[in-house]
Image (cartoon, helix red, strand yellow):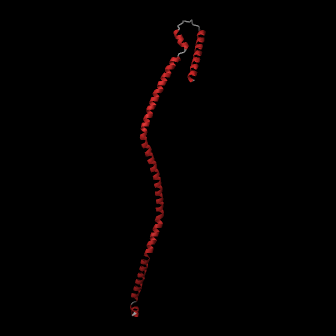
Amino acid sequence: MMSVLNLADPELEAKTKKATERLSENMHIVANEPSLAFFRVQEHVRKALPPMVEKRMEVSQLHQHLQGHIYDIEYAIGAIKSFDGADSSFKHIQEMMKSSIFVRQQLKYEENRKKSKEGSSVYKRLSAHITLDLPDLPEFSDAIRETANKVESIMTSARQTSSQQ
């Protein structure tokens, strides 16, 4: 019977041979399809993984920086909240400064008052009570002025040394 098929039709034989080759090729493709799929997956991973790892490292660094900034902000918020408690201290300091300025003004006033009392020399106080009409002697009045100035400077220096001690 085999000989009957061989003699029958060479065209049919060519078509059959071609069909079996295609069937064999398709079977080969189907059998190796998982390998091709794995190859495609491997190719994708090889291309996509390095940029993904790089981005992941960048995100990790940004996260660390962000954590540092969050810590700084929380610290600043805590410092600002502590200012609320400092309000009473600043008011107390302000009141103490006002009172110290007032006391300083009182001390200056007393000091100026004492200076004005002590500032007039003995000669000036004495000359205010004595009214003599002396003749106009230019040499004599210059000598008196010089003597009065010397006496005043001696008295002033004596007062200063006594107040410093």
Q: Which residue is drawn at 42% across and 77% down?
A: 30
Q: Position of residue 153 (x, y in %)?
A: 58, 18
Q: Where is residue 61 in the image (x, y as percent from the top left)?
A: 48, 56
The number of callouts visible is 0
**Is the N terminus in the top left, top right, bottom left or bottom right quadrant?**
bottom left
Q: Position of residue 46 (x, y in %)?
A: 48, 67
Picture quadrant where residue 10 is located: bottom left
Q: Which residue is drawn at 47% across and 57% down?
A: 60
Placement of 10 over or under 121, stated as above or below: below
Picture quadrant where residue 26 is located: bottom left
Q: Position of residue 6 (x, y in %)?
A: 41, 91
Placement of 111 over or under 50, stated as above or below: above
**Is the C terminus in the top left, top right, bottom left or bottom right quadrant?**
top right
Q: Residue at x 45, y 47 (%)?
A: 75
Which residue sits furthest front? 165
154 vs 41, nearest the viewer: 154
Placement of 56 over or under 157, stated as above or below: below
Q: In this view, does 105 lie to the left or right of 158?
A: left
